[in-house]
Amino acid sequence: MFIFRRIKKLKAMNKLKKFIIQIAGGKNFNEAAEKAGYGSLEEPRRRLLELADSINESIIGLNIDSEKTQKALSDLSCRKPAFLEIYCDGASKGNPGPASAAAVAYLPSGMRVASRVKKLGSATNNVAEYQALILGLSLAKDIGVKKVYFKLDSQLVVRQLSGEYRIKNDKLKILAQKVKELELLFEKCEYQHICRSRNKEADKLAGDIIAGKED
């Protein structure tokens, strides 16, 4: 009987592990529960509570000094990620027309940790793309990370910043200069061009704010 109970417990833990991995990958709770094979959120909720109780009992059993424990937990919560990946996108309805910018930050694990959006008034699409990057740089600064990798679906912005393309537009020159100033706040700052299909979240946020969907 002990072996069967052990196998059952291992299966339950593996299932919970799948659930946690789905959450870390950006899935919402319902999607994560479905992917892990749960019929509802009640079972993973109960399993997580049992796991938390088990961890709490282990800490008490070790008789760790409470003040030191609290400091260790505080230090852990204050640790910054090794780097962030930030997806940026600008939108302009009319080019020029009502414009917006959005940036979405992800941990190395792929977990989404923060996002930021901004209305820009009337602007061209290229201006909006630069503003989105500036928004992403500001977001990275506020989080406190030192290495950041930006993903943009604007080939123009990426190639202008790399020096491959000349910047002829005066407004874009000013924005590019602002980007270069913000770059100095980081140890490493890289830009990569990606296809639009890989930038769906930032694209949706930028589009929603133009449409007035500011949830």
Image (spheres, helix red, strand yellow):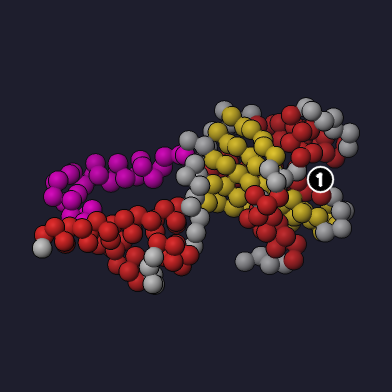
* Residue 33 coordinates in the image, percent (x, y): 41, 65
In the picture, which quadrant includes the N terminus? bottom left
100 vs 40, left or right, is right
Q: Quadrant of residue 173?
A: top right
Q: Quadrant of residue 154?
A: top right
Q: Quadrant of residue 43?
A: bottom left
120 vs 32, left or right, is right
Q: Is residue 71 above or below residue 33?
A: above
Answer whether residue 59 is magenta in the image.
yes
User: Which of the pair 106/176 is nearer the observer?
Assistant: 106
Residue at left offset 49%, top offset 41%: 108
Any part of residue 78 in sight: yes
Q: Which residue is mark 1?
A: 126
User: Which of the pair 158/127 is nearer the observer?
Assistant: 158
User: What kind of element bears circle 1?
Assistant: helix
6 vs 174, left or right, is left
User: Which of the pair 175/2 is nearer the observer?
Assistant: 2
* Residue 72 coordinates in the image, percent (x, y): 30, 41
User: Which of the pair 63/47 is nearer the observer?
Assistant: 47
In the picture, which quadrant includes the C terminus? bottom right
Taken as a whole, is the magenta stretch helix, strand or loop? helix
Residue at left offset 85%, top offset 33%: 167
Label 1, residues with CA under 10 Å away: few <14, some 14-19, many ≥20: some
Q: Which residues are magenta?
A: 53-81
Residue at left offset 48%, top offset 65%: 31
* Residue 209 coordinates in the image, percent (x, y): 71, 61
Residue at left offset 35%, top offset 71%: 42
- Residue type (three-letter) at the residue carrying disc 1: Asn
